[in-house]
Image (cartoon, rainbow, N blue to C red):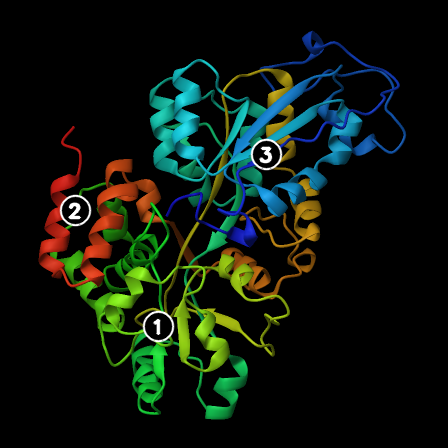
Amino acid sequence: MPSGERWPGGAWSRRGTLRHGVAIVGALGVVLALTGCNSDSGDGGGGGEVKAGCESFADYGTFDGASVNVYSSIRDIEAERFEESFKQFEDCTGIDIVWEGTGEFEAQLQVRVDGGNAPDIATIPQPGLLKTLVDKGAVKPAAEKVKTQSEANYPKDWLDYGTVAGTFYAPPLGANVKSFVWYSPKTFTEKGWQIPTTWAELKTLSDTIAGTGIKPWCAGIESGDATGWPATDWVEDLVLRTAGTEVYDQWVTHEVPFNAPQIVTAVDEAGSILKNDKYVNGGFGGVKSIATTAFQDAGLPILDGKCALHRQASFFANQWPEGTKVAEDGDVYAFYLPGQDTSSKPVLGGGEFLAAFNDKPETQAVQLYFGSESWVNAKAKIGDWFTANNKLDVANVANPIDKLSVQLLQDPETVFRFDGSDMMPGAVGAGSFWKGMTDWITGKSTADTLKYIEDSWPKS
């Protein structure tokens, strides 16, 4: 799923073009030269007096007019919330964090790297892209202090996504959970429908709803140049549920080919809903209308009673019209997309990773701060954001869906896997997989679709 389309806590948007960074540099009582910083450890310049109110920032060091450019797909109101979250850090350390958001993040980041104009830090949402940049020699390994903090604050799965060939490069930042089904609590109560706890129960519920004359599901995969990504999320969730995590991991790395029997089963299971005229597409039309329905609009018919269920990620909370109450007793809410049984809890999701393109001490200080307990809790309090950082206090997460997401991520029974298309080579994950699933929705067979995607996998 493309970073320019994802909205974890509202963080990914196509509404704007570029966010300008803030420039808030505090008047420090004592300013130390950059050369006083320990670049191997990630420490800032030490010693000297600490400005009143800045005691908790002392370990990051103080800097005289240093600037750190953070390049990201996160922009608009979400970028403003990031800027708000690090104002005190800027004031206390003297580092001006210049936040630069763009809708052309993936392409332009590589252009900048290849042109010798890499940012100091980039928030990379695709482990596959991180590996590409590491292979180019562009990304610096995380400083020891950043590595140590990350190992204490994040689950191993998340650390692995920021690791290439055994070296840890990029600590996690934000997160999103994709294994959700949106619904109307009021409608469920009125109809006497129960939240399903297994995949079989979900299918039975779909039949029950269809029997009332309501199309149980609504869906939409149109997303401009990235059309098709919501359908790939369906497949990824179903691979986890029908084939398990081991096959999922092998599929993402191509040890299991795209047209293997296990993947065929998962796609056909997704098709038992998405290509079922009895089930879709509530409020929009028939099966083929899914391909032309914008993903931002796809769940809205739930509010009008034209459909009852919509599978989409936690970030869809930001797509409901202003005034919609998102809560367990509200206008809309979401439940966990159930697995084959209640004994396992696979969760599909995504997030970003902080890659540094130099080892300047001010760069390492920012990278360290964004993984700290104090920052993740301060950022969560601002709203519409969460992380897999285990130091995040769920009490600081206001949005009910974000709170539910954090509880899932912190649940020891949860088995988390990163969005598969983001782990695959770009030609597949952001190319043939999206296009293939769009063609599948509009009538292409599962066998032909998966052969097309399989044939597109890079040979070397």
Image coords of residue 266 (percent x, y) = 21, 62
Which quadrant does the C terminus fall into?
top left
Q: Amino acid at mark 1?
A: Phe
Q: Amino acid at mark 2?
A: Ile
Dot 3 falls on a residue whose secondary structure is: helix
- Tag 1 and tag 2, C-beta contact below 8 Å: no
Label 1, label 2: how many angstroms apart (C-alpha)? 28 Å
Q: Amino acid at mark 3?
A: Gln
Residue toward you, 1 or 409: 1
Image coords of residue 382 (percent x, y) = 70, 50
Q: Which label belongs to residue 284?
A: 1
Q: Earlier in the sequence, mark 3 or mark 1?
A: 3
Residue toward you, 209 or 44: 209
Image coords of residue 114 (percent x, y) = 38, 17
What residue is pinned by disc 3?
149
Q: Is residue 179 above or below residue 257?
A: below
What residue is pinned by disc 2?
453
